[in-house]
Image (cartoon, rainbow, N blue to C red):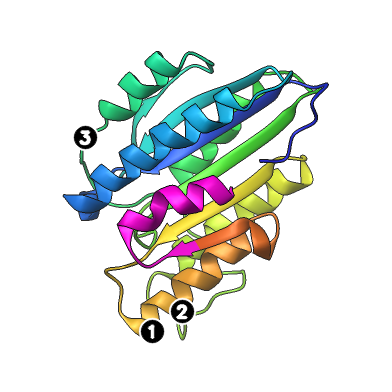
Amino acid sequence: IIQDKTMESYTVLVLDNSTSMRGEPMDAQKEAAIKFCSDALSSNTGTDYKFSIVAFGSSIQLASEFTNDLSKLTDTINSINLTGATNYIVAIDKAAELLSNVGQNVVKNIVFCSDGLPNTGSTSSTGPFTSSDHSSYRYANAAVERTNELKKEGINIYTLGFFHSLGSSSRNYADTLMKDMASAPDMSYIVDDPQKLSGVFSEV
């Protein structure tokens, strides 16, 4: 996570809780997210470092206040349940709303995690994707459009896609979408096995 040791840092950890996450993916995501928060907080050497957790499916299931209390973060992550489809925009908008309330002279980060393609929510016909890429391209264009706005505001966006259940054609499209949403290509991570999530979170 980009941070300045003299500044406060706020990170929204956006976790997918759509029904496609059932079983091992959800278990691995929770475990990796808790370890991510624990590692970041234990390595804090001066920065006032806080996390918020957002869980999304078709809508927002939960959105916690920013905290550096690992016990609260752990309880919040463990309380996430499966529900609905995959609405990227509603999750991105909630993360942006949370970060808008923490002031200006701080470091702001979003770590966005999903195992599926956006298939509900806002759409846009213009953008990097067309119908030749995927039938859900309008949802992807809307997500890229929104994240581009946030990047201009100075928010650092990391994306983690664990697309183990997608076919090769959808996988290529999903990989490109995650890279386009991230602040830079090397801030996008693709995982082919849910059990590798912890390692990827450590890189972030």
Image x and y of residue 185, in percent: 66, 65
Tag 1 secondary structure: helix
Say what amino acid the circle numbered 3 marks.
Asn
Residue at point 33%, 63% (across, down): 193
Residues at discs 3 and 1 in contact (Cβ within 8 Å): no
- Closest to the observer: 101 or 161? 161
Residue at point 26%, 69% (across, down): 165
Residue 191 lies in the magenta stretch: yes
> What residue does disc 3 label?
81
Q: Quadrant of the N terminus?
A: top right
Image x and y of residue 19, in percent: 20, 50
Residues at discs 2 and 1 in contact (Cβ within 8 Å): yes
Residue at point 59%, 34% (across, down): 96
CA distance for labels 3 and 1: 29 Å
Tag 2 secondary structure: helix
Categorize mark 2 by other alpha carbons within 10 Å: few (<14), some (14-19), many (20+).
few
- Closest to the observer: 120 or 76? 76
> What residue does disc 2 label?
172
Which corner quadrant of the image does residue 171 belong to?
A: bottom left
Categorize mark 1 by other alpha carbons within 10 Å: few (<14), some (14-19), many (20+).
few
N-term-proximal mark, 3 vs 1: 3
What stretch of residues is rendered in magenta?
190-204
Asked if 79 appears above or below 32 in the picture, the reply is: above
On screen, residue 59 versus residue 189, left or right, reads left
- Closest to the observer: 90 or 8? 8
Categorize mark 3 by other alpha carbons within 10 Å: few (<14), some (14-19), many (20+).
some
Is the stretch drawn in magenta largely helix, strand or loop? helix
CA distance for labels 2 and 1: 5 Å
Image x and y of residue 88, in percent: 44, 50
